[in-house]
Each structure stands twice: as C-alpha cells, then as structure tokens.
Amino acid sequence: MSELEFPEPGHRLGSLTLVPRADEKQTAKEFKSDQEVRWCPGCGDYAILAAFQSFLPELEIPRENLVIISGIGCSSRLPYYVNSYGMHSIHGRAPAIATGLASSRPDLSVWVITGDGDALSIGGNHLIHALRRNVNIKILLFNNRIYGLTKGQYSPTSEQGKVTKSTPFGSLDTPFNPVSLALGAEAGFVARTIDSDRKHLTSVLRAAADHKGTAFVEIYQNCPIFNDDAFLPVTEPGAREQHVIRLEHGEPIRFGADAGMGLRFSRFGSLEAVPVADADPASLLTHDAHAPDPSYAFALSRLDSSDFAHTPIGVFRKVERPSYDELMAAQIDSARQKQGHGDLAELLAGTDTWQVG
C-alpha cells in the first residue's frame, strides 16, 4: 500500500469531493489484491468481484480513500480481494461499522458487502437503521437465497417450502423481499441487478456510487453448490426475456416477447401486467425512479413472486435528501457557534444527577 494521501476538492461523488492522484491513472489491475480468490467453482461472486474491480477506476478515487467493509459469509470475503482499505468484520454488523466510519470520515468512499443471511438475519436491525438514517455508504447485498458458507441452511430469502439441511420438511417462513424491506426503511436509492449481467450490474454500480447517502443494491447471485439455478427464470436465454422487467427512468415499462407487455395500476393500487395492445395507453406506466413518495417503487417490488413471473431489475427509487454525515456536521457546527467548545466534565456531570442512599 502506498503512502496515505488525502485529495484536494475536485471530483464529485455523492456527498464526497475527491480527486485522483495526479501521478497515475488507476486501472482495474491496481484494485486486485495479492490474495488468492477462493470461492467455489462457478460461484456468482467471481462475476461480481470482476465487475466491481473493473468499475472502481471510474470513480477516480485513490485506493487509500476507498474502504470496503463486510460481515460474515461467502460474499464477505470480498474485501480480501480488493487492494484498498477494508475490514472483514463480524456477523451482521458491517452497516454499523460503516456508519461510524462514514460519519467520522466524509472524505472516504465506504462500501458494504453483505449477503442475504448476514444482512437480513442477525444484521437486520443494523441494515434498516443505516437505510433510514441515509448514511453515506453503498450497500451491496449478494442474494443467493441460501446460507452458503455454513453449507446450505435456509436463509431469510429462501422461498417457502425450501428443503435444506435445516428445513428437511420445507421452510415454513415467509421470505423477506430485500427491495421491499429497503423501501420500507425509507432508503433513498434502491436497485436490483444480476451477477451474470455484467453490463447491467456495472450500470447499477455507477448509479449507486453517484448517489448522495445510502445506496442499497440487491444482486441476484448464484450458488452452484447449495442452491444452483435459483434464478434460472431471469438468467436463462429465452426465459429471461419473458420474466425480466428492465427499469429505465423516463422510459415506458415494456417487457415480454416483442415488448408486448406493460404495467398499470389495478383497482386497489397494486401493479398488474397487461398486454399493451389491449390496454388504454394512458393507463400504462412510464418508470419514474425520482417519485418522492415510495409507494410506486414499493408496488414495483411487490411484483416479485417465487416463480419470477414478473421480476423488475434496475433502479427502483433514486431520491435526494440530506445524508447523515451532512446533518451531523451541520449540527456540530451549529452547537459550536452557539456554545463554543464543550466542557467534557460538565457534560458528564450534567444537570440530571441523583444521590442514592
């Protein structure tokens, strides 16, 4: 690792203002560490890692200002393989650690790598609070709908009835929908992509990086050992064209054979797929990722079903609001202007004291 450098203002990335080092232009190779990449053959994590490393030079951020924090799981090995600062932390706690770092060091670009088990089980509470606070971090959730590292138990996103080592007669749990959960937690940026679609994955990463505040990205990721072909309807040529709904802001929502299907609102506010030829053109939706109210994006997320009949991918929601680090800095500055530098002893003693006994 080269000597730590802190850039002068220049390059804009969300609420960060950064510049590249003047002496070199970074390449994907420079973001590859000297560690042997060790996942199971065919794991979708390889494709995500390659896309992530290839994308990072576009940020024009020195490696010393890039931090990758993970929890526990197969996905959480990723910080080892990126030549930057990072931390392989403890189960489910990556958003909490990233919150502290991003709040205290706004000059850093902080990325969280997590999985469906890590983020949505033991880490569920940390995840939703990071989202609602709008901390300036980017969260990539690798969803393979299984616990891979611990050898094939069902996870919070496994479909009901899933037979695994821990549910030999089928899972009784209703699975989480990660996109719905993120929207319910007031996340300002919510997206979904697929490990095998390199072009789409990279475009979503770019959009997440440019967003000010928390960006949440669910990535469908295949586990060839314990849950192979879990996403086959949206990855197999021929089938995916029928099932995948590609969301592009400002574009009419069209999908299916010859783009013959569209979406409209039903009587009770949910979305329904209808043949374009049979529908009133005024009723068919054009995607608006910038709608201030999350109801529309939430309705899109509810199209998901266990058979992937209609599966949206892309940016569901992208709205701007002040990030947590901005609000915190403003609050601290305001307090200093009113009160000057604080007295720690006075703060600890305070006025709310009690004598016991």
Image: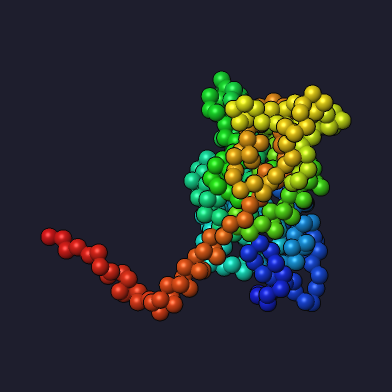
Of residues 336 and 168, the one nearer the viewer is: 336
> Compared to 277, does 225 lie above or below?
below
Q: Residue furthest left?
A: 357
Q: How many marks?
A: 0
Residue 218 in the image: above or below residue 330:
above
In this view of the protein, which residue sits in the foreground, 196 or 217? 217
Q: x, y (%) of residue 337?
A: 44, 77
Q: Residue furthest bottom?
A: 340
Q: Is residue 204 above or below residue 350?
A: above
Quarter of the rendering occupied by the N terminus: bottom right
- Looking at the image, which residue is at 79% across and 77% down? 23
Instruction: Point out the image quarter for the C terminus.
Output: bottom left
Residue 188 is situated, as x and y percent measured from the top left of the image, at 60, 51
> Residue 325: horizontal and vertical position, in percent?
54, 64
Can residue 152 be seen in the rendering of this structure?
no
Q: Quadrant of residue 17?
A: bottom right
Residue 228 place in picture, x, y as percent:
72, 32
Q: Quadrant of residue 144?
A: top right
Q: Residue furthest right?
A: 258
Front one among 116 and 210: 210
Q: How is the image coloured?
A: rainbow
What residue is shown at x 40% (from left), y 79% (from top)?
340
Residue at (72, 32) in percent of width and height: 283
Q: Is residue 28 visible?
A: yes
* Residue at the (72%, 53%) spot, across then down: 207
